[in-house]
Amino acid sequence: MKISKQQATAVLIAEAKSALEGPIDPHWRKEIEDFSRICDETTLTHIAFLGTAILAKSTNLAADVWSVKAKSKGPGAYSARGLGHGVLVKNAPVLGLNLGVTGREPLNNQPYFQIDQISRRTTVHGKARRALDALCDILDQLTKISSLKDARVVLRAFIFVRRQQNPTYGAFTEVSRDLSVEKLITIIEAFVAEDSEGGKRAQAVVAGMLDLHAGKERVMTSRINDPDRHLPGDVGVHVAGSTDVWEKVFEVRDKKVEVSDLYHFAQKAMEHSVAEAAVVAVSANQPLLETHDVGKWASERGVSMTYFSGWAPFIRQALFWAVVPSPVGVQTVPSYVLTRLIELEVSEQGVALWSSKVSVQER
């Protein structure tokens, strides 16, 4: 079945307004708060799917809340990806909704991109089982709802709860005037070393530095642990004027890198027809590596392989690549990094720390 995006948008906006005015059903508020807490402790991917399922049910009672793709079995099958990305994700920033992840296509993640329906039998790994079970418990209840009015009560509660979960990020008004290249290097080293956050901080810094070089529209990065089906690395720079050809790709590692990792990444770049690849190794415990042989090996296969050991050489190189002089770039890049920190879901504390290190915060 096809669910009208226009109708779903109208329902979402109406219930978002109602959620501000109340009342909020206490049963559904607790259900979604408990579910949100489990997702915070395990995996956040299921939050966007639950919101989509509730929205689908609130728009058309015949919608199968277990459906992921329209080709799944059953008369109520619909495209959760189409509705989620086209309505819920699109309107979430304006409505102040935290969907758990900030990417434009959260249902392209595991397990949703490869299944037609969600169920308790869906394959998930480790701690993600708790979140899946909690999701299915709520879907069981949604299946039994027999009126649009009752479905929209659930949607209102979802909106209310997820608004409460929306992070408040600090911002800065201006970059410190005495910020120099050397100070920027020192700040970045300390910022990433203070808390890796699973590699998010390092990846955001690399993406922000490359935004200065190529512009945000050409630089792509994906959330930590996303399968790199489209991007053969952590951060990539598109060829100007193209959205599917890579000029450069970067692997960002804040854990120890070995020579074998360089071979592996060069091989991946070759398989994706990328001519320039780089590994940015920023662990404080990174040993010295002899890279001559891997560079020669990659060159013979059409790949120029670059290895940056530590933050200093990468930052200096990125500033050199930039279309503006380094003194200007140093003043500009903190805002690019801030944007990437938020995009990659770095903690509120991490974002606030970055702002405090490079500039004056708004009060």
Image: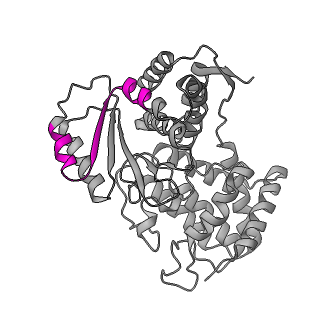
| Residue at figure coordinates x 63%, y 81% from the top left | 2
Residue 345 screen position, x and y as percent? 54, 41
Q: Is residue 5 magenta?
A: no
Camera sees residue 243: yes
- Corner quadrant of residue 260: top left
What is the magenta range?
Answer: 293-317
Residue at the farthest right position: 21
Residue 234 screen position, x and y as percent? 40, 46
The quarter of the picture where the N terminus appears is: bottom right
Compared across the picture, whether 42 is left or right of 80 comes to left
Compared across the picture, whether 100 is left or right of 314 comes to right
Camera sees residue 27: no
| Residue at figure coordinates x 50%, y 59% from the top left | 242
Residue 236 screen position, x and y as percent? 43, 48
Q: Is residue 311 magenta?
A: yes
Q: Is residue 242 above or below residue 40?
A: below
The quarter of the picture where the C terminus appears is: top right
- Front position in the image: 130 or 52: 52
- Front position in the image: 70 or 318: 318
Q: Is residue 132 above or below residue 295?
A: below
- Corner quadrant of residue 193: top left
